Image (spheres, rainbow, N blue to C red):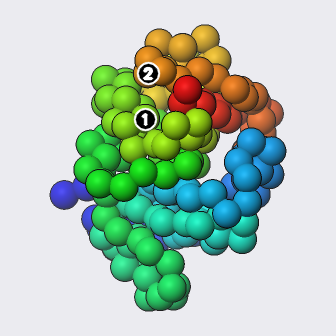
Amino acid sequence: MGYFDDNKNVDDYIRMADGYDGCQVVKVLERYLPPGSSVLEVGIGPGKDLTLLGVKFKVCGSDLSQLFVDMYLNQNKDVEVFQLDAVEMNIQRKFDCIYSNKVLHCIDQNSFRKSLVNQSKVLNKGGLLCHTLWYGDKMVLAKGERYYYYSEKTILNYIPSGMNIIHSETYQEMDENDSLLIILKKY
């Protein structure tokens, strides 16, 4: 059973994340991705970013937690949302962009590499990966879960062949420069 397969953990996360969304990340993405492009969000959680992305893009949402999937579908019947493992990426479609906001830091570094490789396989040529991560070079243990931090330097170790960085910046989510936004392009 995963952490977000428990109603209490989902409720705690929703309370903790209240007031946070990816609006500044989506604004950066809009510089690189034309309106109407197809976007798959990996790890929608409560779905705030999926709703933001849906203003300009054709969106699909996914999460490993069926609780988050069902919660979003109960309030948004016209958006396609399904359960998906962000590492395996077992989906038979292609997208112009795959997006996540503070999701991939929850998987170990080998799985992170595998996820990026598998994501690149479901991107159209010229497609983008747009991800935010906690910034740094460490692993943090919190509530029994491991969280991996990445920097501009360490992220280079995980970029799949056939992709390059087109945008990288640190920004503040909670504390100054606590977050990393990375956009990769498939060529």
Query: Which residue is drawn at the image coordinates 38% and 60% (left, top)?
Result: 63
Residue, disc 1: 120
Q: Quadrant of the N terminus?
A: bottom left
How many marks are shown on the rendered structure?
A: 2
* Type of amino acid under label 1: Ser
Residue, disc 2: 160
Query: Which residue is drawn at the image coordinates 72% and 66% (left, top)?
Result: 56
Marking on residue 17: none
**Residue 158 appears anywhere in the view:** no
Rendered position, 183 above or below 102: above
Of residues 66 and 98, the one nearer the viewer is: 98
Q: CA distance from mark 2 to mark 1?
A: 7 Å
Of residues 107 and 124, the one nearer the viewer is: 124
Q: Quadrant of the C terminus?
A: top right
Whether label 2 touches label 1, CB < 8 Å: yes
Query: Which residue is drawn at the image coordinates 26% and 50% (left, top)?
Result: 90
Query: Which residue is drawn at the image coordinates 63% and 57% (left, top)?
Result: 37
Q: Position of residue 55 (x, y in %)?
A: 72, 71
Look at the numbered disc 1 and give the secondary structure of its residue: helix
Residue 51: name its quadrant: bottom right
Q: Residues within 10 Å of mark 1 (few under 14, many from 20)?
A: many
Rendered position, 5 above or below 92: below
